[in-house]
Image (cartoon, rainbow, N blue to C red):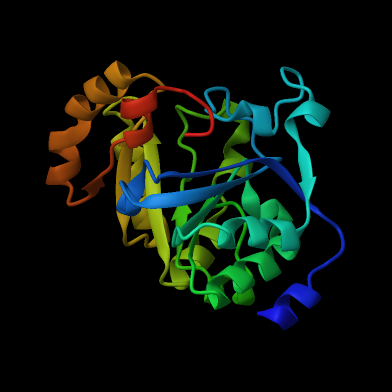
Amino acid sequence: MTALLAAMPHRPLLVSEIFGPTVQGEGPSTGRQALFIRLSRCNLTCGRCDTPYTWDWSRFDAAEQTQKISGEELVAWALGHPTRLVVISGGEPLIQQQLLDPVVRALAAAGREVEIETNGTFAPTTAVAGAVTAFNVSPKLASFAPSDDEPRRIVGAALKALEATGKARFKFVVSDPADLQEVASLQREFGLTEIWIMPEGAKPEQVIARTRQIADEVIERGWNLSTRLHVLVWGDTRGR
């Protein structure tokens, strides 16, 4: 790992926030203790994004919301905790994939499990794909993103590349049962194998109500159902 740290680029990563230990609130690792590294910047402009402070500079001050942190510092922070799972989120982390690469490999070399949360519009490099434990891929559905975002929000080559790693869990955020038909279409078109459905909601009552709306159909379609545990416990509080 010393060699990996020495080889890290001198240019720092753009980071929104680091926090934990907390719990992973979504997907297959729900309930597991985790550290979070949330990177800044995104290539999409989803109006109902729950982390707009990572990219929407019409509403937030980029200088106030962005820290420049070196790869070495991020690794040292994560290894300063006994927590085994490190989740790298955003924004869109793979925008900074070149800088992220040695961080992921160093964490993996130190025995940490690394999950990268991505919107599925960037293909991973061979090195990153080899080092991560999982990609939590969340393609944005039509009801969630602006209508003119479709060419950017669904990138078939990237989805296929992520699926080909054997480490991708495709987690779709839905606000209405009608969204499930689009999920089925994307699954067929791109050969996605592991599907997770998660209700949209920044308040516990929203998460519970939407889970009840979609649960039966999700089960009938043979998919997995995720809650938003952090929202049920802490609402929309940042850093949890």
Q: Position of residue 185 (x, y in %)?
A: 35, 47
Can see residue 184? no
Closer to the camera in the image, 202 or 212: 202
Q: Residue at x 44, y 65 (%)?
A: 163
> In the rendered view, does 156 fall on the left or right side of 71?
left
Would you identify the image quadrant in which residue 107 lies? bottom right
- The reply, left or right, for residue 26 in relation to residue 15 is left
Number of numbered discs visible in the structure rendering: 0
Residue 3 lies, with reference to residue 13, above or below; the image says below
Query: Relative to 150, is 48 above or below?
Result: above
Above-or-below relation of 213 to 107:
above
Estimate the x, y position of residue 96 in percent, counting from the top left. 72, 55
Q: Is residue 25 above or below residue 232?
A: below
Q: Which is more toward the observer, 18 or 100?
A: 18
Quadrant hosting residue 54 = top right
Q: Residue at x 58, y 57 (%)?
A: 78
Judge from the rendering whether residue 54 lies leftward or rightward of residue 238; answer left or right: right
Q: Position of residue 66 (x, y in %)?
A: 76, 36
Residue 33, percent from left and from top: 38, 50
Query: Considering depth in this image, is 104 or 75 the residue closer to the camera?
Result: 75
> Which quadrant is home to the N terminus?
bottom right
User: Is residue 39 among the parts visible in the rendering?
Assistant: yes
Residue under the image location 36 percent in, 43 percent down: 26
| Residue projecting furthest to the bottom | 3
| Residue found at x 18% / y 47% | 221
